[in-house]
Amino acid sequence: MTTTLSIDQTGRFYGYASIFRYPDRVGDIVMPGAFKRSLVTKGSGGIRMLFQHDPKEPLGLWNRISEDGTGLFVEGRLLAGIARPDALRRLVGAGAVDGLSIGFRTERATRDTPNGLRRLWQIDLWEISIVTFPMMEGARIRSVANQTAETGRLQRSLEAAITHLRNS
């Protein structure tokens, strides 16, 4: 069954670019608060939206980037009239592409022994990309950004509660 994710006429969408406390495919675990300094220093406008982490492929703008109980929540907008974002609007809308991935430099991390997992405590966030295969399975475009603010807050609260119960 294919999931349809409508993107509004302005190309707006939202999702999670990173999920806290879960290992990604290379064994990195992003900890709550890891993005705080970057977000204070750069704000949403200082973080680029790219396709597949390619600096030659900017797609749009991040309207909002924030940490919540689940992870790094993002709201963005694909720019219209540019070939790649126009194609991605259709691909995301059809459910063919829905991954999000962060591009960053590690500022502070620890390594767990003996499992070798790396906990990321402070990250210098450079960009967030729409990708085909995200390193973190839960980093996905969730739905459209044009839902009411209340619906979005409720969904994030429910996701945070579910995450908390899983970790308990």
Image (cartoon, grey):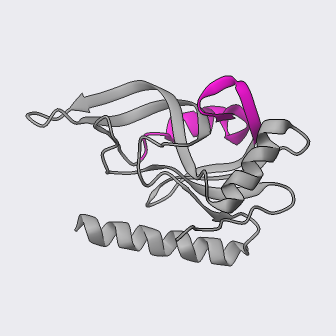
Q: Is residue 18 left or right of residue 80?
A: left
Q: Quadrant of the C terminus?
A: bottom left
Q: Residue at x 31, y 34 (%)?
A: 26
**Closer to us: 107 or 13:** 13
Residue farthest to the left, as pictured: 114
User: In x, y percent, where is residue 46?
Assistant: 70, 32
Q: Is residue 151 above or below residue 4?
A: below
Write down the quadrant of residue 129 in the picture.
top right
Q: Is residue 96 left or right of residue 165?
A: right
**Closer to us: 15 or 81:** 81
The answer to whether one can see residue 48 in this image is: no
Q: Residue at x 75, y 61 (%)?
A: 7
**Closer to us: 22 or 69:** 22
Q: Residue at x 55, y 46 (%)?
A: 100
Q: How many marks?
A: 0
**Residue 54 part of the magenta-drawn span:** yes
